[in-house]
Amino acid sequence: MAGNYPSFQNPIPRFQNYNFASTSSHHHQHHDGLVVEQEENMVIKEQDRLLPIANVGRIMKNILPPNAKISKEAKETMQECVSEFISFVTGEASDKCHKEKRKTVNGDDICWAMSNLGFDDYAEQLKKYLNRYRVIEGEKSNHHGKGGAKSSPDN
């Protein structure tokens, strides 16, 4: 199963000494389980910023042998990592949309961001998934008499 995923055997040079927390223009500050978004003057609860730890643990467990255990620390570390990664990629896609005067980030924008950030192998797999998803959604729409796949409005 692990062979289906691109690996990071050789770290991508552009990410060495890269501070992911500083990539956002929102300057995060942790305080009593909250993340303060200083520029926007709004408060986001930790539970809203992070993926649910049970989901992260389940994903981790699916790739491990049945008898393997995962420490709470490992789950929390992965939870922080994947949540930051989502913010990192989405921020890149959002910047592209902003430059193109679009409000909606779509799957193609996420694929572009992944590739632009050096995650080409993942971007290619994600493009294949996105294409299959669109075909299936189009078939579902056709079976329900709606015509074609709906695209989300951009404004």
Image (cartoon, rainbow, N blue to C red):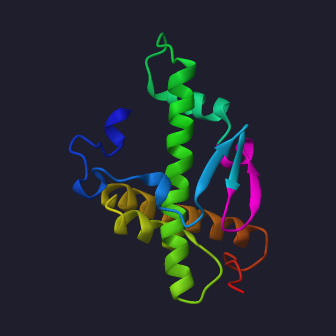
At horizontal 49% and vertical 14% (from top left) the residue drawn is 66
Left-right relation of 39 to 108: right
The N terminus - image quarter: top left
The C terminus - image quarter: bottom right
**Residue, far bottom:** 101
Q: How many marks?
A: 0
Left-right relation of 149 to 86: right
**Residue, far top:** 67
Left-right relation of 21 to 15: right
Residue 138, by quadrant, is bottom right
Residue 144 in the image: x percent, y percent?
A: 79, 69
At horizontal 64% and vertical 34% (from top left) the residue drawn is 55
Task: Determine if the magenta segment contains residue 42.
Answer: yes
Task: Determine if the magenta segment contains residue 66.
Answer: no
Q: Which residues are magenta?
A: 37-50
At horizontal 53% and vertical 49% (from top left) the residue drawn is 84
Q: Is residue 11 above or below residue 151?
A: above
Q: Nearer the viewer, residue 85 or 154?
A: 85
At horizontal 31% and vertical 37% (from top left) the residue drawn is 3
Residue 126, by quadrant, is bottom left
Q: Is residue 50 above or below residue 119?
A: above
Residue 23 in the image: x percent, y percent?
A: 47, 61
Q: Nearer the viewer, residue 96 or 152?
A: 96
